[in-house]
Image: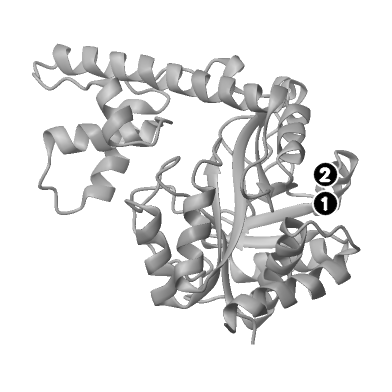
Amino acid sequence: MAPDVNAHIHTPYSFSAFGSISEALDKAAAEGVRVVGINDFYSTDGFLEWRAGCAERSLYPLYGIEFIALDTGMQESGLRVNDPGNPGRIYLSGKGLACPPILGGDSAEALARVRREANAQTALMCSKLNEYLRSEGLTVQLDFEQIRSDLSCGLVRERHLAKALRLALYPGSENPAALENELRSRLLKAGGPAFVPEDPAAFLPVESVQGIIKAAGGIVTYPFLGDNTKGGFTDFEGDLQQAVDKLRSLGICSAEFITTRNSTAVLEQYSAYLEDDGFIVSFGSEHNTPAMEPLRLRTRDSEALSDKLLAAGYRGACAIAAHQAGLRLPRTAMIEEGDKLIQQVLSA
Protein backbone atom coordinates (compact mmCIF):
# COMPACT_ATOMS: atom_id res chain seq x y z
CA MET A 1 0.00 0.00 0.00
CA ALA A 2 1.29 3.48 -0.88
CA PRO A 3 2.58 5.56 2.04
CA ASP A 4 0.64 8.67 3.01
CA VAL A 5 1.83 11.81 1.24
CA ASN A 6 1.08 15.49 1.82
CA ALA A 7 2.90 17.49 -0.85
CA HIS A 8 1.65 20.99 0.00
CA ILE A 9 2.11 22.31 3.54
CA HIS A 10 2.57 25.96 4.47
CA THR A 11 4.83 26.91 7.35
CA PRO A 12 5.40 30.13 9.34
CA TYR A 13 7.63 31.29 6.48
CA SER A 14 4.38 32.39 4.83
CA PHE A 15 1.39 31.74 7.12
CA SER A 16 0.48 28.48 8.77
CA ALA A 17 -1.68 26.75 11.31
CA PHE A 18 1.62 25.58 12.78
CA GLY A 19 3.77 27.67 15.05
CA SER A 20 6.97 26.09 13.76
CA ILE A 21 8.32 23.64 11.22
CA SER A 22 9.02 21.21 14.06
CA GLU A 23 5.37 21.27 15.06
CA ALA A 24 4.28 20.49 11.51
CA LEU A 25 6.72 17.61 11.13
CA ASP A 26 5.89 16.19 14.56
CA LYS A 27 2.23 16.12 13.57
CA ALA A 28 3.05 14.48 10.24
CA ALA A 29 5.07 11.76 11.95
CA ALA A 30 2.34 11.19 14.54
CA GLU A 31 -0.28 10.77 11.80
CA GLY A 32 1.91 8.46 9.72
CA VAL A 33 2.35 10.93 6.86
CA ARG A 34 5.81 9.93 5.68
CA VAL A 35 6.32 12.08 2.56
CA VAL A 36 5.87 15.79 3.22
CA GLY A 37 6.23 18.87 1.05
CA ILE A 38 6.92 22.41 2.23
CA ASN A 39 5.11 24.88 -0.05
CA ASP A 40 5.26 28.49 1.17
CA PHE A 41 4.18 31.64 -0.64
CA TYR A 42 7.12 33.46 -2.23
CA SER A 43 9.67 31.73 -0.02
CA THR A 44 12.28 28.98 0.03
CA ASP A 45 13.60 30.16 3.41
CA GLY A 46 12.33 27.11 5.26
CA PHE A 47 13.93 24.48 3.02
CA LEU A 48 17.03 23.71 5.08
CA GLU A 49 15.08 23.53 8.33
CA TRP A 50 12.52 21.28 6.59
CA ARG A 51 15.27 18.98 5.31
CA ALA A 52 16.91 18.70 8.73
CA GLY A 53 13.60 18.10 10.49
CA CYS A 54 12.59 15.39 8.04
CA ALA A 55 15.95 13.66 8.47
CA GLU A 56 15.45 13.60 12.26
CA ARG A 57 12.05 11.92 11.85
CA SER A 58 12.80 9.61 8.88
CA LEU A 59 10.36 11.53 6.67
CA TYR A 60 10.96 12.19 2.98
CA PRO A 61 11.06 15.92 2.17
CA LEU A 62 9.66 17.59 -0.93
CA TYR A 63 10.42 21.24 -1.68
CA GLY A 64 7.89 23.62 -3.19
CA ILE A 65 6.91 27.27 -3.50
CA GLU A 66 3.69 29.10 -4.36
CA PHE A 67 2.95 32.27 -6.34
CA ILE A 68 -0.02 34.33 -7.43
CA ALA A 69 0.37 35.36 -11.07
CA LEU A 70 -1.79 37.64 -13.19
CA ASP A 71 -2.93 37.20 -16.78
CA THR A 72 -4.21 40.62 -17.83
CA GLY A 73 -5.98 39.24 -20.90
CA MET A 74 -7.96 36.79 -18.81
CA GLN A 75 -8.60 39.53 -16.27
CA GLU A 76 -10.03 41.87 -18.90
CA SER A 77 -12.26 39.12 -20.28
CA GLY A 78 -13.49 38.19 -16.80
CA LEU A 79 -12.16 34.61 -16.98
CA ARG A 80 -11.91 32.93 -13.58
CA VAL A 81 -9.00 30.49 -13.43
CA ASN A 82 -8.21 29.05 -9.97
CA ASP A 83 -9.19 32.06 -7.89
CA PRO A 84 -13.00 32.09 -7.98
CA GLY A 85 -13.29 35.71 -6.88
CA ASN A 86 -10.62 37.35 -9.04
CA PRO A 87 -10.64 36.89 -12.82
CA GLY A 88 -7.19 36.51 -14.36
CA ARG A 89 -5.49 35.76 -11.07
CA ILE A 90 -3.66 32.43 -11.26
CA TYR A 91 -2.10 30.47 -8.42
CA LEU A 92 0.98 28.53 -9.50
CA SER A 93 3.24 26.23 -7.51
CA GLY A 94 6.76 25.04 -8.10
CA LYS A 95 7.47 21.43 -7.12
CA GLY A 96 10.76 19.63 -6.66
CA LEU A 97 12.91 22.73 -6.19
CA ALA A 98 16.60 22.39 -5.41
CA CYS A 99 17.66 22.21 -1.78
CA PRO A 100 19.72 24.12 -0.76
CA PRO A 101 17.95 26.84 -2.77
CA ILE A 102 19.82 27.95 -5.90
CA LEU A 103 17.84 31.02 -6.95
CA GLY A 104 19.96 34.02 -7.94
CA GLY A 105 20.27 36.92 -10.36
CA ASP A 106 17.17 38.39 -11.99
CA SER A 107 14.93 35.62 -10.66
CA ALA A 108 15.98 36.29 -7.07
CA GLU A 109 15.40 40.01 -7.53
CA ALA A 110 11.94 39.42 -9.05
CA LEU A 111 11.00 37.24 -6.08
CA ALA A 112 12.33 39.85 -3.63
CA ARG A 113 10.33 42.57 -5.39
CA VAL A 114 7.10 40.59 -5.10
CA ARG A 115 7.74 40.09 -1.38
CA ARG A 116 8.36 43.84 -0.96
CA GLU A 117 5.13 44.68 -2.79
CA ALA A 118 3.17 42.17 -0.71
CA ASN A 119 4.49 43.67 2.53
CA ALA A 120 3.79 47.21 1.31
CA GLN A 121 0.16 46.27 0.70
CA THR A 122 -0.29 44.72 4.15
CA ALA A 123 1.45 47.71 5.76
CA LEU A 124 -1.15 50.00 4.17
CA MET A 125 -3.86 47.64 5.36
CA CYS A 126 -2.46 47.79 8.90
CA SER A 127 -2.55 51.59 8.77
CA LYS A 128 -6.19 51.59 7.59
CA LEU A 129 -7.08 49.08 10.28
CA ASN A 130 -5.61 51.37 12.93
CA GLU A 131 -7.63 54.28 11.55
CA TYR A 132 -10.78 52.19 11.79
CA LEU A 133 -10.02 51.12 15.36
CA ARG A 134 -9.54 54.77 16.37
CA SER A 135 -12.79 55.75 14.68
CA GLU A 136 -14.56 53.10 16.75
CA GLY A 137 -13.12 54.52 19.95
CA LEU A 138 -10.71 51.67 20.58
CA THR A 139 -7.25 52.34 21.97
CA VAL A 140 -5.69 49.24 20.43
CA GLN A 141 -3.19 50.04 17.67
CA LEU A 142 -1.19 47.48 15.70
CA ASP A 143 2.52 47.91 14.98
CA PHE A 144 3.34 46.53 11.53
CA GLU A 145 7.04 46.12 12.25
CA GLN A 146 6.30 44.31 15.49
CA ILE A 147 3.93 41.98 13.65
CA ARG A 148 6.60 41.30 11.07
CA SER A 149 9.13 40.59 13.81
CA ASP A 150 6.98 38.61 16.26
CA LEU A 151 4.34 36.85 14.18
CA SER A 152 5.96 36.30 10.79
CA CYS A 153 9.21 35.19 9.25
CA GLY A 154 9.43 38.39 7.22
CA LEU A 155 6.43 38.07 4.90
CA VAL A 156 3.30 39.63 6.44
CA ARG A 157 -0.07 38.54 5.09
CA GLU A 158 -3.67 39.48 5.92
CA ARG A 159 -3.88 36.53 8.28
CA HIS A 160 -1.01 37.91 10.36
CA LEU A 161 -2.95 41.16 10.82
CA ALA A 162 -6.06 39.23 11.84
CA LYS A 163 -4.02 37.19 14.31
CA ALA A 164 -2.41 40.30 15.80
CA LEU A 165 -5.80 41.96 16.23
CA ARG A 166 -7.28 38.84 17.81
CA LEU A 167 -4.37 38.66 20.26
CA ALA A 168 -4.84 42.35 21.15
CA LEU A 169 -8.62 42.25 21.57
CA TYR A 170 -9.43 38.67 22.57
CA PRO A 171 -6.25 36.98 23.86
CA GLY A 172 -8.24 34.30 25.71
CA SER A 173 -10.58 33.33 22.88
CA GLU A 174 -11.78 29.72 23.04
CA ASN A 175 -11.89 29.44 19.25
CA PRO A 176 -9.05 31.63 17.97
CA ALA A 177 -9.09 30.24 14.41
CA ALA A 178 -12.77 31.03 13.88
CA LEU A 179 -12.35 34.49 15.39
CA GLU A 180 -9.34 35.31 13.20
CA ASN A 181 -11.25 34.19 10.13
CA GLU A 182 -14.18 36.39 11.14
CA LEU A 183 -11.97 39.44 11.73
CA ARG A 184 -10.24 38.92 8.39
CA SER A 185 -13.53 38.51 6.56
CA ARG A 186 -15.24 41.54 8.10
CA LEU A 187 -12.34 43.98 8.25
CA LEU A 188 -9.64 43.07 5.73
CA LYS A 189 -11.35 41.53 2.72
CA ALA A 190 -13.02 43.46 -0.10
CA GLY A 191 -15.77 45.66 1.32
CA GLY A 192 -14.19 45.80 4.77
CA PRO A 193 -13.05 49.09 6.33
CA ALA A 194 -9.36 48.13 6.22
CA PHE A 195 -9.32 46.59 2.75
CA VAL A 196 -6.57 47.80 0.43
CA PRO A 197 -6.66 46.62 -3.21
CA GLU A 198 -3.50 44.85 -4.25
CA ASP A 199 -1.28 46.81 -6.60
CA PRO A 200 -0.91 45.05 -9.95
CA ALA A 201 2.84 45.40 -9.39
CA ALA A 202 2.47 42.79 -6.65
CA PHE A 203 1.71 40.15 -9.30
CA LEU A 204 4.08 38.72 -11.85
CA PRO A 205 2.90 37.52 -15.25
CA VAL A 206 2.65 33.76 -15.68
CA GLU A 207 5.80 33.62 -17.81
CA SER A 208 7.86 35.35 -15.10
CA VAL A 209 6.62 32.97 -12.41
CA GLN A 210 7.46 30.03 -14.64
CA GLY A 211 10.95 31.46 -15.12
CA ILE A 212 11.53 31.79 -11.37
CA ILE A 213 10.34 28.24 -10.69
CA LYS A 214 12.52 26.78 -13.42
CA ALA A 215 15.53 28.82 -12.29
CA ALA A 216 15.00 27.38 -8.80
CA GLY A 217 15.12 23.88 -10.28
CA GLY A 218 11.40 23.19 -9.98
CA ILE A 219 8.46 21.84 -11.94
CA VAL A 220 5.80 24.44 -12.79
CA THR A 221 2.55 23.12 -11.33
CA TYR A 222 -1.04 24.27 -11.73
CA PRO A 223 -3.18 23.97 -8.56
CA PHE A 224 -6.67 22.90 -9.62
CA LEU A 225 -9.46 24.44 -7.57
CA GLY A 226 -11.83 21.64 -8.61
CA ASP A 227 -15.49 21.42 -7.67
CA ASN A 228 -17.03 23.65 -5.03
CA THR A 229 -19.68 22.59 -2.51
CA LYS A 230 -22.40 23.17 -5.12
CA GLY A 231 -20.61 21.07 -7.73
CA GLY A 232 -19.53 24.09 -9.75
CA PHE A 233 -16.21 24.86 -11.44
CA THR A 234 -14.42 28.01 -12.54
CA ASP A 235 -14.60 29.10 -16.17
CA PHE A 236 -11.12 27.72 -16.84
CA GLU A 237 -11.56 24.34 -15.14
CA GLY A 238 -15.10 23.39 -16.13
CA ASP A 239 -13.93 21.99 -19.48
CA LEU A 240 -11.07 19.75 -18.37
CA GLN A 241 -9.70 18.99 -21.83
CA GLN A 242 -9.69 22.67 -22.68
CA ALA A 243 -7.83 23.39 -19.44
CA VAL A 244 -5.30 20.65 -20.20
CA ASP A 245 -4.73 22.02 -23.69
CA LYS A 246 -4.16 25.53 -22.34
CA LEU A 247 -1.78 24.30 -19.64
CA ARG A 248 0.20 22.29 -22.17
CA SER A 249 0.41 25.35 -24.42
CA LEU A 250 2.06 27.11 -21.48
CA GLY A 251 4.46 24.23 -20.96
CA ILE A 252 2.77 23.11 -17.74
CA CYS A 253 2.48 19.33 -17.28
CA SER A 254 2.08 19.07 -13.51
CA ALA A 255 -1.05 19.63 -11.43
CA GLU A 256 -1.99 19.52 -7.77
CA PHE A 257 -5.15 19.47 -5.68
CA ILE A 258 -5.92 20.59 -2.13
CA THR A 259 -8.02 17.54 -1.42
CA THR A 260 -10.44 18.88 1.21
CA ARG A 261 -11.87 21.25 -1.41
CA ASN A 262 -13.12 18.45 -3.62
CA SER A 263 -15.48 15.51 -3.66
CA THR A 264 -13.92 12.07 -3.96
CA ALA A 265 -15.64 11.47 -7.31
CA VAL A 266 -14.32 14.66 -8.91
CA LEU A 267 -10.84 14.22 -7.44
CA GLU A 268 -10.64 10.69 -8.83
CA GLN A 269 -12.01 11.78 -12.21
CA TYR A 270 -9.75 14.79 -12.64
CA SER A 271 -6.56 13.20 -11.32
CA ALA A 272 -7.02 10.09 -13.48
CA TYR A 273 -7.70 12.19 -16.56
CA LEU A 274 -4.60 14.29 -15.96
CA GLU A 275 -2.38 11.27 -15.32
CA ASP A 276 -3.66 9.61 -18.50
CA ASP A 277 -2.65 12.77 -20.33
CA GLY A 278 0.90 12.52 -18.93
CA PHE A 279 0.64 15.03 -16.07
CA ILE A 280 2.38 14.65 -12.74
CA VAL A 281 -0.40 14.86 -10.12
CA SER A 282 0.16 15.67 -6.43
CA PHE A 283 -2.07 16.30 -3.43
CA GLY A 284 -1.79 18.47 -0.32
CA SER A 285 -3.64 20.20 2.50
CA GLU A 286 -2.17 23.75 2.56
CA HIS A 287 -2.67 24.45 6.28
CA ASN A 288 -2.40 28.16 5.43
CA THR A 289 -5.27 29.18 7.72
CA PRO A 290 -5.40 29.35 11.55
CA ALA A 291 -7.44 26.13 11.71
CA MET A 292 -5.53 23.05 12.82
CA GLU A 293 -6.71 20.14 10.68
CA PRO A 294 -5.24 16.68 10.06
CA LEU A 295 -2.19 16.39 7.82
CA ARG A 296 -3.35 12.99 6.66
CA LEU A 297 -5.27 13.88 3.53
CA ARG A 298 -8.99 13.50 3.07
CA THR A 299 -11.58 14.72 0.60
CA ARG A 300 -14.56 16.95 1.24
CA ASP A 301 -16.83 13.93 1.65
CA SER A 302 -14.50 11.33 3.15
CA GLU A 303 -12.21 11.10 6.17
CA ALA A 304 -9.45 9.47 4.09
CA LEU A 305 -8.28 9.25 0.50
CA SER A 306 -9.36 6.21 -1.48
CA ASP A 307 -6.70 3.65 -2.41
CA LYS A 308 -6.87 5.00 -5.95
CA LEU A 309 -6.08 8.52 -4.78
CA LEU A 310 -3.38 7.38 -2.35
CA ALA A 311 -1.61 5.59 -5.21
CA ALA A 312 -1.93 8.60 -7.52
CA GLY A 313 -0.55 10.96 -4.86
CA TYR A 314 2.38 8.67 -4.22
CA ARG A 315 3.19 8.41 -7.93
CA GLY A 316 3.26 12.18 -8.08
CA ALA A 317 5.52 12.39 -5.05
CA CYS A 318 7.88 9.84 -6.61
CA ALA A 319 8.17 11.87 -9.80
CA ILE A 320 8.84 15.03 -7.78
CA ALA A 321 11.45 13.24 -5.67
CA ALA A 322 13.26 12.05 -8.78
CA HIS A 323 13.21 15.57 -10.21
CA GLN A 324 14.68 16.92 -6.96
CA ALA A 325 17.46 14.38 -7.31
CA GLY A 326 18.36 15.81 -10.71
CA LEU A 327 16.85 13.04 -12.83
CA ARG A 328 15.27 14.03 -16.11
CA LEU A 329 13.57 10.93 -17.50
CA PRO A 330 10.18 9.96 -18.95
CA ARG A 331 7.46 10.13 -16.29
CA THR A 332 7.19 6.35 -15.77
CA ALA A 333 10.93 6.10 -15.18
CA MET A 334 10.82 9.13 -12.87
CA ILE A 335 8.17 7.41 -10.76
CA GLU A 336 10.23 4.22 -10.55
CA GLU A 337 13.41 6.04 -9.57
CA GLY A 338 11.60 8.31 -7.13
CA ASP A 339 10.05 5.29 -5.45
CA LYS A 340 13.54 3.89 -4.85
CA LEU A 341 14.70 7.19 -3.35
CA ILE A 342 11.71 7.45 -1.03
CA GLN A 343 11.79 3.84 0.08
CA GLN A 344 15.47 4.14 1.00
CA VAL A 345 14.54 6.81 3.53
CA LEU A 346 11.29 5.28 4.78
CA SER A 347 12.84 1.85 5.31
CA ALA A 348 15.96 3.13 7.10
Residue 85 in the image: x percent, y percent?
A: 56, 34
**Which residue is the site of mark 1?**
253
Q: Secondary structure at mark 2?
A: helix
Residue 122 in the image: x percent, y percent?
A: 40, 22
Three-letter residue code for mark 2: Leu
**Which residue is the site of mark 2?**
247
Say which of marks 1 and 2 sits in front: 1
Q: Residue at coordinates 72% horizontally, 48% vertically from top-left?
A: 221
Cα gap from disc 1 to disc 2, whole angstroms: 7 Å
Can I make out residue 88 in this image?
no
Circle 2 packing at 10 Å, graded few (<14), some (14-19), many (20+), is some
Give whichever of discs 1 and 2 has the lower sequence position: 2
Can I make out residue 226 in this image?
yes
Q: Are marks 1 and 2 in contact (CB under 8 Å)?
A: yes
Three-letter residue code for mark 1: Cys
Q: Quadrant of the N terminus?
A: bottom right
Q: Is residue 225 depicted above or below 55 in this figure?
A: above
Residue 189 in the image: x percent, y percent?
A: 40, 28
